[in-house]
Amino acid sequence: MADYTFIDLFPDFANRETPEGVKGWNDLFGDPLLNPTASVGVTHVVFTFVLVGIIGVMAMIAWRRFKDPEKALVPEGQLTITNFMELICDAVLNMMTDLLGEKAARRYFPLIGALAVFIFIGNIMGLVVGLYPPTSNLNTSFACALVVFVVYNVGGFKAMGFGYIKHFFGPVALLAPLFLAIELVSHAFRPVSLSVRLAGNMTGDHIMLEIFGDIAADIINVPFLLPVPFLFMGLLVSIIQAVVFCMLSTIYIALAIHHDDH
């Protein structure tokens, strides 16, 4: 369960600038904004590309079956990649339909469905030895949350026009400044809460698996036995976090485009 950094994977390039092999990436990408003295870590970027590659292969396999309608209607007798993708898409679409209605659910399904697959597979990458879950990095999770933030606000403007701005000021004109402050803080906190919840839970899960994996390897002679319950727990956490992220994102979209109904 080693958390390899990009420097570990490509030490020669990293060591070009300094003997320590740290500052080279800072010179290439710039110092981190929040902590300029820290070294740049791009492990999550590397494994995000790995994740996108995995999803791309799975999508191609599923597409080859679904492009033939007659073949797609015949259920397969075992769990396959096609069934797996269909299961996720059906579950996400049903959840969205309950919250948004059928028309809006189909409109926003490409976003939420893609996030569901990306987050879930990214989460379970942490259960595979040698892989790193990119969703445990705040940069990755915040990027997903920021996309949701932009989409639901744009959707609110398209659905309600200027009325979308009016709801920020509340129903009472005298209290408009107070309502505006509350709404701005609330909306600004949404992508933060989405990203911190996802990254924090997956980081904790990854650390827990690594700790118990090391204990099993160092203390007992069955290193693959002790972590098994925690692998199952990690799978549950991966599923729950993907569901929570997608459900909250759908709720934010529903509040934006159907605000007058609430």
Image (cartoon, grey):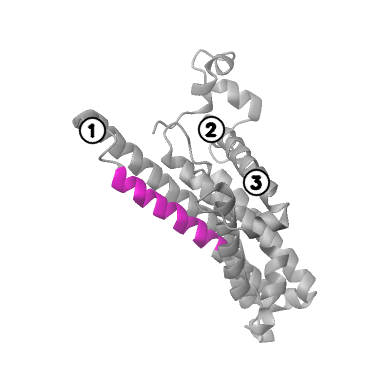
Image: 170 above or below 188: below
Residue type at tag 1: Val
Given residues 173 and 257, the one toward you in this image is: 257
On-image quarter of the C terminus: bottom right
- Gap between marks 1 and 3 measured at Cα: 37 Å
Disc 3 on helix, strand or loop?
helix
Q: Which of marks 1 and 3 is nearer the N terminus?
A: 3
Whether 246 is drawn above or below 41: the answer is below
| Quarter occupied by the N terminus | top left
Q: Can residue 247 be seen?
A: yes
Question: Nearer the N terminus, badge 2 or badge 3?
Answer: 2
* In magenta stretch: residue 240: yes
Question: Image quadrant of residue 254?
Answer: bottom right
Across and down, in percent, residue 140 comes to 57, 45
Q: Position of residue 11 (x, y in %)?
A: 52, 17
Q: Tell which circle, 1 or 2, labels the residue nearer the N-terminal end.
A: 2
167 horizontally vs 77: left or right: right
Q: Is residue 174 left or right of residue 11?
A: right
C-alpha separation, residue under disc 1 versus residue under disc 2: 30 Å
Near-viewer residue (84 or 179): 84
Part of the protein shown in magenta: 228-246
Disc sitting over residue 59 in the figure: 3
The residue mark sitting in front, 1 or 2, is 1
Q: Mark 1 points at which residue?
A: 222
Question: Is 29 one of the magenta-colored residues?
Answer: no
Q: Mark 3 is on which residue type?
A: Ala
Residue designated by label 2: 43
Q: Residue 68 carries which label?
A: none
